[in-house]
Image (tube, rainbow, N blue to C red):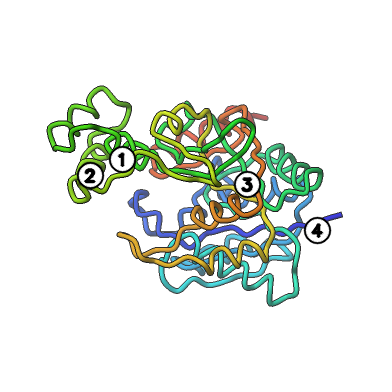
Amino acid sequence: MNDFVAILLCAGKGSRMNDDSTNKVCFPVNGIPAVRRTIDNMRAAGIEKFVVVVGHKADKVMECLSCYDNVAYAYQAEQSGTGNAALMGLNILKGLGYRDAALICMGDKIISSNVISKLIDCYRSTGSKTVFAVQPKSFNEGGGRIAIKGDKVCGRYEQTDSYILKLGALAEQSEEAYISALENTPINEKKKKKVIDYALAHKGALAPKVLLSEEWFDHTDIESGEYVNTATYLCDVSETVNAINMLDSNNAQGEIYLTDAINIMVAESGAKIIPISAKEEMLTFATKDELAEVSDYFASIEKE
């Protein structure tokens, strides 16, 4: 039986909280720090060992988790992306001789034990090296799209990138045509500007389709998909390390993204997905107002 380890990414600044008194994952949700809620749910699902990647306010995170045994820490000195953060934790596991699978997730996501158990059961029963949780688009309209052809999971694709495909298919490549094509679309004005600016900078070189796991997808294919990503993965440690090491930070943010590594693994050996049926099975927050909403939810179900 697999003895899984969890890697929790807790190095980020959480700047939208507008409160630098502690790390975002340590903010209490109805009296219990968010990261402790997720660890408790993981323990209920059978995961007993943890690697926590820390960075910003690392001392606060370590203090928050001092009540647990079997927790190791990896330090991400610079905010270099989720791929780099995951690699810090994965290297700890490889150094300890661990060769099985790791559940990799964000420390500010409160994931139910039910979802974690389903990921574990799928990994064990299917033999897949990559299993990840997804949710309906209605739960997160701006989430990274899950590209599927038939019953084949082909990868993840950004919502804004799918609209770039839409512009790439236009017969007329002009700013006016781009603006017209994006009217009455479900992306906000900020994202529209990002898409149009990119299209104008690459006019004449925009592709109408993208190849994911040897399958072609256009804008309609991507947007007709049912699910979006939740950034919660159960995957083989060695394969994940190898995939991350294939990446570089040659992008606008200068960061290495874990999602790019997941796409590599999906293309190489396939993947399985676990759909989340209830929004409450995976909750997160980015602002104090959202934190209050999540706290209110737990207060309503945890009344004495």
Q: Nearer the viewer, residue 82 or 295?
A: 82
Q: Between marks 2 and 1, how big is the CA–CA gap?
A: 7 Å
First in sequence: mark 4 vs mark 1: 4
| Label whose residue precedes the other's in the sequence (3 or 2) | 3
Crowding near pointer 1: few (<14 within 10 Å), some, many (20+)? many
Kindly identify the amino acid type of the residue bearing the numbered disc 2. Ala
Note whether 269 is above or below 159 in the view shown: below
Three-letter amino acid code at the position of disc 1 = Ile
Foreground mark, 3 or 2, reads 2
* Side of 288 where 136 appears, left or right: right
> Dividing the image into 4 quarters, which one contains the N terminus?
bottom right
* Label 3 SS: helix
Residue tagged by mark 2? 199
Look at label 4 and name its amino acid: Asp
The label on residue 164 is 1
Most extreme residue toward the top, as rendered? 184
- Dot 4, how many residues are within 10 Å of its Cα: few (below 14), some (14-19), or many (20+)? few
